Image (cartoon, rainbow, N blue to C red):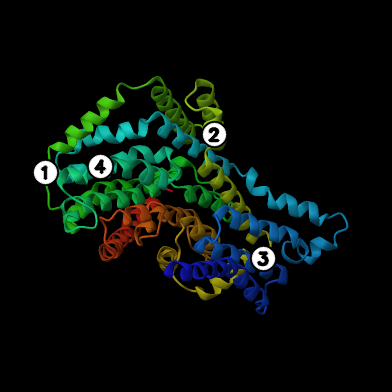
C-alpha cells in the first residue's frame, strides 16, 4: 500500500524537476532588463541559467539538457541570439547563422580532445593495463597502511594524464581494486570495523584524485572545457605543459602530503598487514606477462603525451589524439565496436559541445562584456592582489552549490574571467591558471563535489559526518596551498 502511494509522489517530484529549469528561465526573462544590457542578451542569459539549473538537478541527462538549451536559443534566434543591428542587415540570414552557432561546439578542438582522451581510457580498461599499474604499486607498497595509501595515490597519478574522467579513473579503476583490500584487515562497511583501514583507504583515494584532477590538463573533462572558455573569453591559450608546470610544486606537495595527512587526521587502526602484497601478487600472476596490446597502448599514450607537451607548434593536440586513436584501431588495441559502443564518450562529446556553444554565446550576445563592466565597478579601487584572491575564493567556495564541476565551470568561469579582465593590474594569465587549476581541488569539499565522490561516499566506509568534516579540512588545506604555494610560483614562471 505504501509503495502504491509513493508512486505518484515520485512522478510529481520528477515533473517538478523537469519544469524547474523552464520556470527559472521564464521568471528571469520576465524580470526588467538591467541597464546597459540589450533585451536579447538578457533572454539568452535566462535560457542559459535554465540550462545550468537543469545540469545541477539533472531531471534528464546533461547532454539532453544542453541540447535542449541550444535548440531553444536557435529556434528563438530573432529574440535571443541576434542583435537588432544584425537582423537589420539584408545580407544576414538569421536561420542559417543560428544553425551554425548551434553546432559550433561540435567543431571545437577541445571537445574532440576530450573524446580522444576517453578512447585512451577505453584502451586502459580493455587491455587491463590500468589495473596492472595499480596492482604493481600495491604489491610493493601495500604492507603498511601508510605506504598502501601512497600506492593508491601513485596509482591515480600514473593514470591521471591519460584519463579525462576522474570517475572512470578513480571510480572505475582504483575503487574496484581497493574495495578488495579492507576485508583482508577485517574492515567492513557500515560497521565500527570500517575505521580499521577501509575508511582511511577510501579517503586517500578520493582526496588524491582531486589533486591529480588539477595537476594535469587531461585528468578531468571540465579542465578541457575550461581551456576552451579561457581561450574564448581571455584569448589565452593554455598548453598541456603550461598547465602542468603551473601546478607542479603544489601538486607534488599535496600528493606527498595527502596520505600522511589522512593518516594523522583519520588514522587507520591497523598499521601493518602482510596479506595485501600477497593478494596483489596473486592478482598480477593471473594477469600474466605484459600483452602485445598493453605494450602498444603504452607506446601510443606516451607518444600522445609527447605530442601534447612538445609538438603543439606542429600538430593540434586534438589531432594528435585522433592520430593515436587511428593507430589503436589499426593495431587492434581497440576495435570500431569499442568506439561506437562507448556511451560515456559520446555522451560527454555531445554534452560538452553544447556547453562550449552556450558559453561562447554569452560572449557573442554581449552579456559577458556587460557583466565584466558591472563587476569592475564593484571592485573598483581594490588592490589587484586582493581582488584576485577574493574572486578565486568566491569561485572555489561556490562549488558547494554544484553537484557537477562541468556545471560550475560553464556557469561561473566566463563571468569571473570577464570581471578579472576589467580590473586594471590583474595578471590575467596567472589569474586564469589559478581559476582552472582549482577545478579538481574543489571537488573534495562535498560528498557530491566531483564524479567519484558519490562512489566513495556510498562505499559505507565514510560516514556523512566524517566526510563533511574531512572535506572542510582538506578543502581548506588545498585552498591555502593554492594561494600560498601555487600563486607565487605562477607569478614567477608564467
Point out the residue furthest to the right here: 90
Mark 2 neighbour class, 10 Å CA radius: few under 14, some 14 to 19, many 20 or more: some
Where disc 1 sits, the SS reads loop
Residue 61 in the image: state x and y as whole percent: 55, 55
The quadrant the N terminus occupies is: bottom left
Where disc 4 sits, the SS reads loop
- Structural distance between the alpha carbons of marks 4 and 2: 30 Å
Q: Which numbered tag is attached to residue 44?
A: 3
Quadrant of the rendered image containing residue 438: bottom left
Q: Is residue 427 visible?
A: yes
Q: Is residue 360 visible?
A: no
Badge 4 vs badge 1, beta-carbon distance below 8 Å = no
Badge 4 vs badge 3, beta-carbon distance below 8 Å = no
Q: Comparing marks 2 and 3, which lies closer to the viewer? A: 2
Quadrant of the rendered image containing residue 28: bottom right
In the rendered view, tell whether residue 399 sits above or below residue 182.
below
Q: Earlier in the sequence, mark 1 or mark 2?
A: 1
In the rendered view, tell whether residue 41 sits above or below residue 261.
below
- Structural distance between the alpha carbons of marks 4 and 1: 16 Å
Task: Name the residue tied to disc 1.
Answer: 272
Mark 4 neighbour class, 10 Å CA radius: few under 14, some 14 to 19, many 20 or more: few
Badge 1 vs badge 2, beta-carbon distance below 8 Å = no
Left or right of 446 in this view: 119: right
Task: Name the residue tied to disc 4.
Answer: 180
Amino acid at each position: 500500500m505504501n509503495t502504491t502511494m509513493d508512486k505518484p509522489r515520485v512522478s510529481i517530484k520528477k515533473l517538478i524537476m523537469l519544469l524547474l529549469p523552464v520556470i527559472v528561465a521564464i521568471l528571469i526573462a520576465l524580470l526588467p532588463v538591467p541597464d546597459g544590457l540589450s533585451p536579447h542578451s538578457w533572454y539568452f542569459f535566462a535560457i542559459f541559467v535554465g540550462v545550468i539549473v537543469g545540469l545541477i538537478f539533472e531531471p534528464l541527462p546533461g547532454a539532453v539538457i544542453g541540447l535542449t538549451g541550444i535548440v531553444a536559443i536557435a529556434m528563438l534566434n530573432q529574440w535571443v541570439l541576434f542583435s537588432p543591428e544584425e537582423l537589420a542587415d539584408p545580407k544576414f540570414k538569421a536561420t542559417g547563422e543560428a544553425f551554425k552557432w548551434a553546432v559550433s561546439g561540435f567543431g571545437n578542438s577541445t571537445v574532440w580532445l576530450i573524446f580522444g582522451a576517453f578512447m585512451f581510457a577505453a584502451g586502459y580498461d580493455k587491455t587491463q593495463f590500468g589495473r596492472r599499474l595499480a596492482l604493481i604499486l600495491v604489491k610493493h607498497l601495500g604492507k603498511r597502511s601508510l605506504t598502501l595509501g601512497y600506492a593508491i595515490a601513485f596509482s591515480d597519478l600514473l593514470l591521471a594524464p591519460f584519463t579525462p574522467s576522474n570517475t572512470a579513473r578513480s571510480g572505475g579503476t582504483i575503487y574496484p581494486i581497493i574495495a578488495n583490500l579492507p576485508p583482508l584487515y577485517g574492515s567492513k562497511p557500515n560497521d565500527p570495523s570500517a575505521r580499521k583501514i577501509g575508511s582511511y583507504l577510501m579517503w586517500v583515494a578520493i582526496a588524491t584524485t582531486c589533486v591529480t584532477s588539477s595537476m594535469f590538463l587531461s585528468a578531468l573533462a571540465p579542465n578541457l572545457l575550461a581551456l576552451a572558455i579561457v581561450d574564448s573569453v581571455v584569448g589565452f591559450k593554455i598548453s598541456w605543459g603550461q598547465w602542468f608546470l603551473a601546478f607542479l610544486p603544489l601538486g607534488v606537495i599535496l600528493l606527498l602530503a595527502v596520505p600522511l595527512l589522512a593518516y594523522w587526521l583519520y588514522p587507520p587502526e591497523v598499521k601493518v598487514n602482510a596479506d595485501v602484497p600477497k593478494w596483489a601478487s596473486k592478482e598480477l600472476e593471473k594477469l600474466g606477462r605484459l600483452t602485445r596490446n598493453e605494450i602498444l597502448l603504452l607506446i601510443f599514450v606516451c607518444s600522445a603525451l609527447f605530442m601534447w607537451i612538445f609538438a603543439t607548434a606542429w600538430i593540434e593536440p586534438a589531432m594528435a589524439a585522433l592520430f593515436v586513436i587511428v593507430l589503436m584501431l589499426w593495431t587492434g588495441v581497440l576495435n570500431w565496436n569499442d568506439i561506437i559502443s562507448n556511451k560515456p564518450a559520446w555522451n560527454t562529446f555531445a554534452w560538452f559541445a553544447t556547453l562550449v556553444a552556450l558559453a561562447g554565446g554569452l560572449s557573442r550576445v554581449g552579456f559577458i562584456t556587460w557583466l565584466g563592466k558591472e563587476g569592475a565597478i564593484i571592485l573598483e579601487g581594490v588592490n589587484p592582489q586582493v581582488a584576485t584572491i577574493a574572486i578565486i575564493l568566491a569561485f572555489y567556495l561556490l562549488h558547494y552549490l554544484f553537484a557537477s564541476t562541468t556545471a560550475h565551470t560553464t556557469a561561473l568561469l566566463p563571468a569571473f574571467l570577464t570581471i578579472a579582465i576589467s580590473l586594471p593590474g590583474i595578471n590575467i594569465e596567472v589569474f586564469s591558471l589559478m581559476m582552472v587549476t582549482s577545478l579538481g581541488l574543489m571537488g573534495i569539499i562535498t560528498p557530491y563535489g566531483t564524479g567519484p565522490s558519490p562512489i566513495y561516499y556510498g562505499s559505507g566506509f565514510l560516514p556523512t559526518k566524517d566526510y563533511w568534516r574531512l572535506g572542510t579540512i582538506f578543502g581548506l588545506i588545498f585552498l591555502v596551498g593554492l594561494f600560498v604555494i601555487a600563486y607565487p610560483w605562477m607569478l614567477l614562471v608564467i
